[in-house]
């Protein structure tokens, strides 16, 4: 589930990343460049350069390493007073984009121009947007790296095992497997987690960042069972995103959330009670309605999640893993919601709605 992110007053400087100390083009000499991370709010890029004539133009190009269909390069024009010596900086205010998850890598380079028409481009450098407020332990298995700072080695191993178990269940029910590396950050509690975000909600307990291959969850030793369930849920979102990512459309919400709910295990009474009430009051939501983002109202949201779980349960139980894999692959190819269902199962969303609601009401 994607959560929005709360302004954190605390700013922590993580240190410098320095590239080649001296570079030159014509008479332009770049003495140093660096980047400072103030997690989670900003990154400050610094440069020092000199020339025999005035340096009159300075630009910073930077890009975020993430899954996408195009290489997006951002460019910042840095205001400078023309001079033979430049020693300046540019701050990237992350509140303007809602923040970045921990561990994100940013690639950057500087472009300079002087009065003689000489231009120079610094070598590409990287800065890692780490949450340096904590001393992280790490554990890697296959393509998953687990980060945690509160708890002993057995705590991390237990959560890694839960992660691997969730991957096995997902593969067994859908055929979906991990493609790209995943980072899993375990904060000690919800408060610490929310402190890693810029616009966090008070109820934020876990968040997945599919394009970044990152999950962040607040888990303490006292709520580890909930944490294992949350890991399975958010992990499913990442794996399914990896498998179905395409430039045409997203998955219908009922499928995305239904698979995540299904993989984390049986529904608890909060969801089943809401669903049973909706059935008795004839207030079930249609499959088409469940394609859109779920309601912010708790009662309606519980019904949405519960229905999505049972729709996915019906498809997997009745038609099997291979059909679900084929459905996900159809979405990867850019099929419409109705088109993908029709291709794999022989019915569209209205047909699915009629069939599964009839079974649900028995």
Image (tube, rainbow, N blue to C red):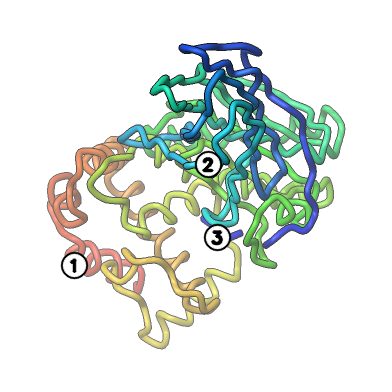
Taking depth in this image into account, of 257 and 165 the one nearest to the observer is: 257
223 displayed left or right of 200: right
Q: Dot 3 corresponds to which residue? A: 267
Q: Residue at x 42, y 55 (%)?
A: 258
Q: Dot 1 corresponds to which residue? A: 350
Q: Tell us which disc is closer to us: 3 or 1.
A: 1
- Do the numbered discs 2 and 1 sit on residues whose CB atoms are within 8 Å? no
- Where residue 315 sits: x, y (%)? 31, 51
Q: Report if residue 62 is visible in the image.
A: no
Work out which quarter of the rendered image holds the C terminus and state it. bottom left
- Do the numbered discs 3 and 1 sit on residues whose CB atoms are within 8 Å? no
Mark drawn on residue 78: 2
Q: Residue at x 47, y 77 (%)?
A: 300
Disc 1 packing (10 Å; few <14; some 14–19; many ≥20): few
Say which element carries label 3. loop
Q: Report if residue 262 is visible in the image.
A: yes
Counting the numbered discs, the total is: 3
Identify the residue at the far bottom of this view. 281
Marks 2 and 1, the one that precedes in the sequence? 2
């Amino acid at each position: 589930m994607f959560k929005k992110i709360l302004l954190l007053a605390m700013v922590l400087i993580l240190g410098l990343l320095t590239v080649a100390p001296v570079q030159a083009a014509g008479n332009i000499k770049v003495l140093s460049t660096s980047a400072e991370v103030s997690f989670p709010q900003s990154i400050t890029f610094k440069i020092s350069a000199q020339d025999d004539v005035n340096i009159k133009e300075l630009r910073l190009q930077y890009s975020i390493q993430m899954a996408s269909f195009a290489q997006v390069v951002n460019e910042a024009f840095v205001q400078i007073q023309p001079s033979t010596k430049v020693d300046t900086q540019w701050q990237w205010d992350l509140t303007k984009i809602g923040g970045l998850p921990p561990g994100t890598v940013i690639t950057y380079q500087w472009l300079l121009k002087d009065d003689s028409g000489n231009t120079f481009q610094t070598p590409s450098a990287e800065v890692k947007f780490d949450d340096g407020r904590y001393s992280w332990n790490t554990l890697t298995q296959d393509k998953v790296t687990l980060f945690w700072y509160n708890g002993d080695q057995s705590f991390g191993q237990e959560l890694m095992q839960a992660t691997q178990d969730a991957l096995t269940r997902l593969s067994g029910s859908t055929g979906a497997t991990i493609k790209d590396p995943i980072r899993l950050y375990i904060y000690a509690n919800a408060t610490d987690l929310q402190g890693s975000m810029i616009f966090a909600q008070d109820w934020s307990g876990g968040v997945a960042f599919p394009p970044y291959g990152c999950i962040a969850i607040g888990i303490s030793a006292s709520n580890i069972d909930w944490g294992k369930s949350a890991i399975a849920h958010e992990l499913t979102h990442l794996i399914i995103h990896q498998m179905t990512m395409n430039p045409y459309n997203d998955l219908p919400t009922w499928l995305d959330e239904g698979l995540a709910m299904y993989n984390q295990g049986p529904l608890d009474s909060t969801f089943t009670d809401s669903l049973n009430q909706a059935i008795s009051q004839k207030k079930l939501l249609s499959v088409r309605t469940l394609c859109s983002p779920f309601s912010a109202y708790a009662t309606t949201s519980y019904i949405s999640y519960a229905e999505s779980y049972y729709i996915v349960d019906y498809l997997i139980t009745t038609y099997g893993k291979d059909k679900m894999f084929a459905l996900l692959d159809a979405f990867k190819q850019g099929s419409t919601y109705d088109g993908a269902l029709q291709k794999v199962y022989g019915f569209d969303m209205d047909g699915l709605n009629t069939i599964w609601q009839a079974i649900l009401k028995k």
